[in-house]
Amino acid sequence: MDAAKVVTCSSCGTTLFLKGGHIALAGDQGVMHDAPLLFGIGDTVSLGRKAIQIFGHARYSYGRGFWDEFCGTSQKGAISWVSVDEGDALEQIRISDGRMPKFRPPFKPGETLEYENNTHTVTEVEQAECIALRGQVDEELQVGETYDFLNATDEDNRLLSGEFWGAGSMWFQGR
């Protein structure tokens, strides 16, 4: 709960922002239509030698479909996101501000990005909309907000993922 910035209420369907000692209404939690899931809130996901306890779930639409992202914590207390898209599950860890790539949109599939001595090839450039939230997450997400994103992979299948809105951005690394 210490890392939570957004919490949903399954009884009334609202979403709340937690800021310091204050709580603010963030809107509703959206409609999470039933779909097959590999795991859910309360489950422990094993990725390699790492186990992640899931405490939040966000669903995103990109027009042609959707994907799910799960917020959780490792045995050591580190927060990460597990993204599940088309049956692939991957852990994504936020890149700190001091190490964030400086790349900005627009991006094109096939374009290469050099980051930390690795060449990543852009494989996906889309716009996403948050359509539903459940549980607790460590980011100030809101149903209905949109952002642009890109995914780029290197030769060892490591993922570099960027999210962009206005002047803001966040970057993640995953495997």
Image (cartoon, rainbow, N blue to C red):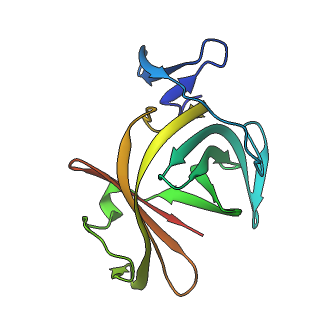
Q: In this view, does 72 lie above or below 110?
A: above
Placement of 109 over or under 73, stated as above or below: below
Q: Position of residue 47 (x, y in %)?
A: 73, 62
Image coordinates of residue 72 in percent, x first then y, are 64, 44
Residue drawn at the location 34% of the way across and 82% of the way down: 111
Left or right of 107 in this view: 15: right
In the rendered structure, the answer to whether residue 119 lies left or right of residue 87 reads left
Image quadrant containing the C terminus: bottom right
- Residue sitting at x 47%, y 52%: 63
> Quarter of the image containing the N terminus?
top right
Q: Give the residue at the far left of this rendering.
A: 167
Does any portion of residue 78 appear in the rendered image?
no
Expressed as whole percent of the image width and height from the top left, the position of residue 93 reads 52, 57
Residue 141 picture location, percent across and down: 44, 36
Q: Nearer the viewer, residue 78 or 59?
A: 59
* Residue that lies at the very extreme toward the front in this rendered image: 64
Residue with the most extreme top position: 12
Q: Residue at x 66, y 62 (%)?
A: 86
Relative to residue 16, is residue 80 drawn left or right?
right
- Determine whether 129 is above or below 144 in the image: below
The answer to whether residue 167 is visible is yes
Residue 158 sits in quarter: bottom right
**Vertical comparison of 64 with 141: above or below:** below
Camera-nearest residue between 163 and 148: 148
Location of residue 135 (image quadrant):
top right
**Rendered residue at 25%/67% (across/down):** 106
